[in-house]
Image (spheres, rainbow, N blue to C red):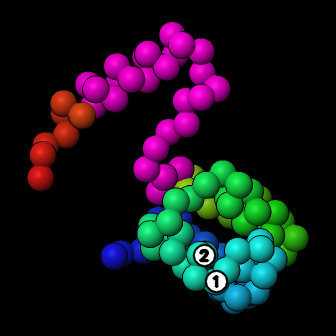
Amino acid sequence: MPITEYGKVIREIRASIPASLRQMARAVKFSPAHLSAVEMGERPLTGEFLQKVINFLRSENVKTNEITRLCAAADRTRRFVDVSALDPAARAKVAAFARRLSDTVPEE
């Protein structure tokens, strides 16, 4: 399985700090295997996980623009959009958009 966009960006940032996968895993309290699986798209990229990664990067004095770049990559990597905070009318609009979008995407 190819690496996700989130995986590419977090690996670049880790290399620039420099920090190993194990060091980051210890800091965010997830196993190195879990971090790797998220980077490869084999495990979900949750909000809780991403927040712990961001906190780690801040503790390592990573620049805000790099953290923003990581968040954008995470958004593109996620397979779902959380609409739980939206009111029912807004959820209906998102659902209608998703149905229309799926009509425009060719089937494989």
Q: Is residue 60 left or right of residue 98?
A: right
The amino acid beneath tag 1 is Pro
- Residue 97 counted in the magenta span: yes
The residue that appears at 72% across and 80% down in the rendered structure is: 25
Measured as percent of width and height from the top left, residue 96 is found at 34, 19
Q: Is residue 81 left or right of residue 1?
A: right
How far apart, in angstroms, are the residues tagged by discs 1 and 2? 5 Å
The residue that appears at 76% across and 86% down in the rendered structure is: 23
* Residue 65, visible in the rendered structure: no
Please tell me which residue lies in front, 14 or 30.
Answer: 30
Q: Which residue is mark 1?
A: 32
* Residue 59, visible in the rendered structure: yes
Measured as percent of width and height from the top left, residue 1 is found at 34, 76
Quadrant of res 54: bottom right
Q: Is residue 26 left or right of residue 49?
A: right
The answer to whether residue 104 is above or below residue 8 is above
Q: Which residue is mark 2?
A: 35
